[in-house]
Image (spheres, rainbow, N blue to C red):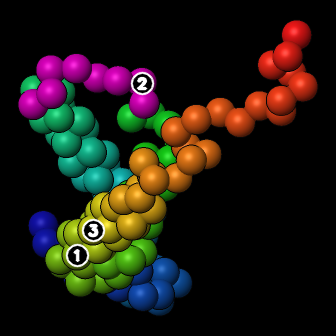
Amino acid sequence: MIVAPQLKAIRNNDQRASCLGYNTRLYAFLSFVISGAFASLAGALSTFIFRYISPDIMHWSRSGMMVMMTVIGRVHPFFGPAEGAFVFVLAKDVLSWLITQDWPSRRYFTSYHFPSNLLKH
């Protein structure tokens, strides 16, 4: 059973694919099950690699980062999300380096500034 042409037809026009005789709900459910299987496989592999599962991976910001990587890399091409992940991580690292490279020279990050009248008691 080849599923790719049916999924492309459903992606382009759901109503037209339904008129062609494809069971769009079945194919949508099948694609959901396949994506869930890949997600669970990725979670299992990360558990084996890190030997620890943190509750932090369930936070909404983690899934938001994945969505941003996919949006940056475009959805349709095969290597799009990987390109988006590369650009996202590179931009995060470069911006972090640009912001934090001169922190030791900034006085307000290295010491507290109290008003002088609070310290005279």
Residue where numbered disc 1 is placed: 83
Depicted 79 relative to depicted 58: above or below: below
Circle nearer the viewer, 3 or 2: 3
Q: Residue at x 58, y 35 (%)?
A: 111
- State which quarter of the image contains the N terminus: bottom left
Q: Residue at x 85, y 16 (%)?
A: 120
Q: Which residue lies furthest to the left in this view?
A: 49
The mark that comes first in sequence, 3 or 1, is 1
- State which quarter of the image contains the C terminus: top right
Asked if residue 103 lies left or right of residue 22, the reply is: right
Indicate which disc residue 55 carries.
Answer: 2
Look at the image and give the residue range highlighted in magenta: 49-56
Q: Which residue is drawn at 56% across and 47% down?
A: 107
**Front one among 25 and 114:** 114
The mark that comes first in sequence, 3 or 2, is 2
Q: Whole-percent x and y of residue 11?
A: 41, 80
Which amino acid is tagged 2?
Pro
Residue where numbered disc 3 is placed: 90
